[in-house]
Image (cartoon, helix red, strand yellow):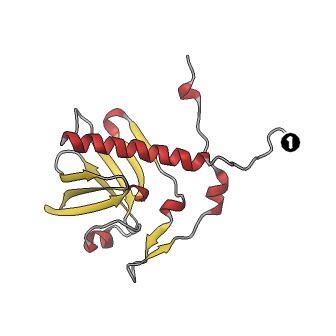
């Protein structure tokens, strides 16, 4: 085969990378949940799809954030539980406590600015199912074939010895 010709990824590196990154997110949240507090100056910005199947939150919040919502986990949060497929937390919005249930598949970004760390999750088959606002039922979202074809490029410079 010609040099530079594209090959079909038979291993599924993109899906494996996304799953590994979600594993980092899950392990991080589990550690904080078990400690009952964020260590040091750590705090998290978590962005998620509000209409994703499995997301549970007050209707008025879904109306206010019809696509994505970013929450801050820092000083005031309660009943923080981390499960294999989701996390649940109570946060205050305009002074009123609200319970959020967010599947890891709905998370699009995770940032801990205290240590300049962040993860960006790409849409995959597990994140394409969204809720139809009319019926409240899950429906597959339109897929982006160009995104699938593009794949993921990871710079190896960070891993090289200096």
Q: Which residue is mark 1?
A: 1
Horizontally, residue 130 falls left or right of residue 16, namely left
- For the question of whether residue 94 can be seen, the reply is no
Q: Quadrant of residue 41?
A: top left
Q: Is residue 125 above or below residue 141?
A: above
Q: Could you tell me residue 72's position as x and y percent?
A: 27, 50
Choose between 11 and 96: the one closer to the eye.
11
**Which residue extends farthest bottom?**
135
Q: Quadrant of residue 51?
A: bottom left
- Secondary structure under tag 1 reads loop
Horizontal side of 88 relative to 6 (left or right) equals left
Residue pushed farthest right?
2
Q: Position of residue 29 (x, y in %)?
A: 30, 45
Quarter where residue 132 is shown: bottom left
x and y percent of residue 88 in the render?
Answer: 26, 57
Residue located at (43% from left, 57% from top) = 105
Q: Residue furthest left?
A: 95
Residue at 46% from the left image edge and 44% from the top image edge = 21
Residue visible at 45% across and 70% down in the picture: 130
Q: Quadrant of the N terminus?
A: top right
Kindly tell me whether residue 13 is visible in this rendering. Answer: yes
Give the left or right position of residue 152, taking residue 73 as reference: right
Residue sitting at 80 percent across and 44 percent down?
5
Please tell me how crowded label 1 is: few (under 14), some (14-19), or many (20+) other residues with Cα within 10 Å.
few
Q: Quadrant of the C terminus?
A: top right
Give the tally of numbered discs.
1
Measured from the top left, where is residue 43 in percent x and y? 27, 41
């Amino acid at each position: 085969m010609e040099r530079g010709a594209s090959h079909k990824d038979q291993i599924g590196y993109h899906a494996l990378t996304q799953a590994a990154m979600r594993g980092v997110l899950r392990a991080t949240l589990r550690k904080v949940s078990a400690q009952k507090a964020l260590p040091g100056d750590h705090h998290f910005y978590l962005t998620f799809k509000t209409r994703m199947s499995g997301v549970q939150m007050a209707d008025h919040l879904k109306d206010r954030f019809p696509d994505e919502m970013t929450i801050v986990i820092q000083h005031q949060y309660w009943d923080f539980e981390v499960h294999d497929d989701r996390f649940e937390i109570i946060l205050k919005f305009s002074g009123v406590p609200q319970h959020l249930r967010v599947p890891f598949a709905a998370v699009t970004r995770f940032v801990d600015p205290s240590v300049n760390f962040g993860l960006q999750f790409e849409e995959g088959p597990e994140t394409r199912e969204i809720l139809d606002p009319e019926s409240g039922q899950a429906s597959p979202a339109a897929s982006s074939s160009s995104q699938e074809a593009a794949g993921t490029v990871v710079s190896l410079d960070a891993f090289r010895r200096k």
